[in-house]
């Protein structure tokens, strides 16, 4: 598991399976911190959506342990129909 910790269990004691998460607002204060936590402590995949990626650039390098688990999608959710497709690709 990523982050070197023990396997996380759900309330029934079953191992939590990796999810694909569509994170709208990933470049903001809360979204960027949540992306950091998800990359460091889980094996979930993140579709990071925002207009800016300044606060998560450090997570997007190809030489990082979580490379391939986070993708940045630059779009304005008010004017871009691609958001619907990203949401359909996600579990959460």
Image: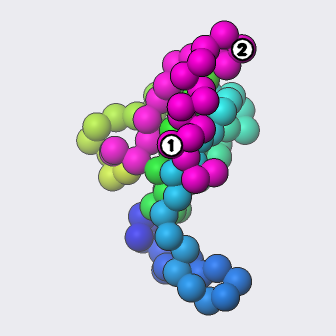
Q: Residue at x 48, y 74 (%)?
A: 5
Residue at numbered disc 1: 89
Q: Can you give x and y, in whole percent of width and height, for residue 46 in the image?
A: 51, 44
Tag shown at residue 15: none
Q: Can you give x and y, in whole percent of width and height, for residue 13 in the image?
A: 62, 89
Q: Is residue 82 above or below residue 3?
A: above
Q: Magenta segment: does it hold 74?
A: yes
Residue extending furthest toward the left: 63
Which span of residues is magenta-colored? 67-92
Q: Magenta segment: does it hold 9?
A: no
Quarter in which the N terminus is drawn: bottom left
Q: Can you give x and y, in whole percent of width and height, for residue 47 in the image?
A: 51, 38
Camera-side residue of 63 and 25? 25
Q: Residue at x 67, y 19 (%)?
A: 77
Q: Can you give x and y, in whole percent of width and height, for residue 20 in the image?
A: 51, 51
Q: Is residue 57 above or below residue 76?
A: below
* Residue 39 in view: no
Q: Is residue 4 above or below residue 31?
A: below
Q: Looking at the rendering, which quadrant does residue 62 occupy?
A: top left
Camera-side residue of 21 and 67? 21
Between disc 1 and disc 2, whose residue precedes? 2
Tag shown at residue 78: 2
Question: Residues under labels 1 and 2: Cα distance?
Answer: 19 Å
């Amino acid at each position: 598991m990523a982050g070197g910790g023990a396997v996380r269990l759900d309330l029934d004691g079953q191992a939590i399976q990796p999810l694909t998460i569509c994170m709208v607002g990933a470049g903001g204060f809360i979204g960027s911190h949540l992306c950091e936590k998800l990359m460091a402590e889980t094996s979930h995949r993140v579709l990071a959506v925002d207009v800016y990626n300044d606060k998560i650039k450090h997570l997007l390098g190809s030489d990082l342990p979580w490379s391939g688990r986070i993708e940045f999608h630059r779009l304005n959710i008010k004017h871009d129909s691609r958001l619907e497709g990203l949401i359909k690709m996600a579990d959460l």
